[in-house]
Amino acid sequence: MESLTTNYAGLVYALRPEIALTIGMLLVLGYDLALGGRMGERTRRCVAVAIGLVTLASAVFQAVCNTAASVTLFHGNFVYDSLSLAVRLGVFALSALALLLVAGTGSKQQRNPAEYVAIQLLATIGFSLMAVSNNLLVAFLGLELASLSLYVMAGFDKTSRASAEAGLKYFLFGGMAAAFMLFGFSLIYGLTGSIALPQIARSLAMQGISPLLLVALVMVLVGFGYKAAAAPFHFWAPDVYQGAPVPAAALIASASKLAGFALFTRMLYSGFAAAGGAADSFSRVPGWVPVLVILSAASILVGNIAALAQTNVRRLFAYSAISHAGAMLIGVIGVRAEGVGPIVYYIFTYGLATIGVFGVFGVIERVSPCQRISDLTGLWKRSPFLAGVLFICVLSLAGVPPLSGFFGKFYVFASALSLNGLGAPVGWLVLLAIAMSAVGLYYYLVVLKAALIANVDFKNAGKIHTPASAATALAIICALTIALGIYPDAVLQLFK
């Protein structure tokens, strides 16, 4: 049952999670300004993280309180359905796990913890707005609010040239992506006379596909390709993953992808569905589906092949993320057949495993560098707990059953194959993704070989202690990775 309200009380009701996050952001800054100078560095950081976690818990409560099945609020600019609820809860959970790493991965990268936590909450506000936006302007505001926050987080370690380089490259590429996307939005507004997705859909259904619409769609897809690190728009990702502080890299690789793909999926299917084109042949009807097939194939090939040549472990996982972005694009295409459940499940479980991997890196960096694959040598002796976490998370990323990463890929590929089978271009794309998964398994096993098999020279490296906050986050991630693999319906039933 759909209702519509246009008063500002309804706007406040619609944005309760965002309001809770804003209040928490102001509280953490106010606390630090008033009392932070009197505290030790560790206490100051732990209190800032605690305020952030309480704020995220409050946002979860506010999001769950809206029990309506499908509601549009404030002139239809915000939409609340199963997709928005699942994505909101997902980004809040991933943000909380990344926030725990702030207290558990050392103080060198977080000399201003309250400011960092406030910026992360601001990014989470952007993610939440992206999840509920039903309007091009609201979508762009949420996307850029999140992006600007992530640029700052990537360059937050002022003592590191690599972090400064990561922030600068992320900002330059992100600004270019925003320009492409906004230009595409302006063309769509010129064609349809509206920025609301339902009105755009009705107008495009009557007009059909025109050359100008195709140009607009290409601009939007280019902009999104940069944001999602899909090939050939991926060049910023390796440098950002390598240079950004661990909590920032974890958030960029997880929550931002979940919110971004949710927004992109809603735009394509709620606003541009009439311009989708044919999924069974490139020669019939042009549209965004054939473009997604090309972007997906390029991402899968470039990501997996380039990862083979990497000796820097962070860059390896950056190229792995590019290949996963290609698989996520397959999930976007498969929404036509199976809905949004498979793609949300895949991205959420991918985000969990990625945060786990970067969490391990962050804990290791407390005592020794962790940039090269060789830096992981003998991890099983230095910290059996971290080695076990890395084992579970890497195998989940590789898609090994019965972990959740396997079922994420399975559901995404099955949804795409249910469209037209193996004989269509999408079917060939699924076969390519399955074949390249074997390549991915190889470089993942290289990482695990260094961590679990090779011996360490104890003259150069000793035992690694895992702080309680990081250990809590990593234990939760492992438990969820295993549990969601055993019971994937815990996420998928939200969309039934």
Image (cartoon, rainbow, N blue to C red):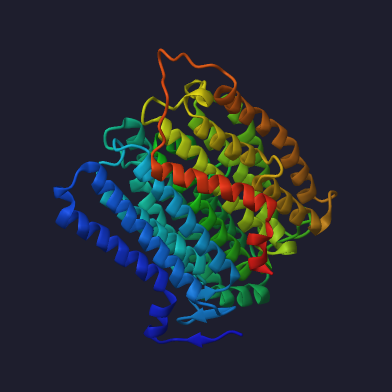
Q: Is 432 above or below relative to 30?
A: above
Question: Residue 33 location, x and y as percent?
Answer: 17, 55
Quarter holding the C terminus is bottom right
**Residue at 72% across / 33% down in the picture?**
438
Q: Is 18 above or below relative to 400?
A: below
**Residue at 70% across / 44% down in the picture?**
402
Q: Is 270 above or below relative to 470?
A: below
* Left or right position of 280 against 293: right
Question: Residue 476 location, x and y as percent?
Answer: 51, 49
Question: Residue 401 location, x and y as percent?
Answer: 71, 42
* Left or right position of 401 against 394: right
Quarter of the rendering containing residue 362:
top left
How many marks can you see? 0
Quarter holding the N terminus is bottom right
Question: Residue 290 location, x and y as percent?
Answer: 70, 53
Q: Nearer the viewer, residue 205 or 335?
A: 335
* Left or right position of 9 against 84: left
The reply to whether residue 242 is in sight is no
Quarter of the rendering containing residue 308:
top right
The reply to whether residue 370 is in sight is yes
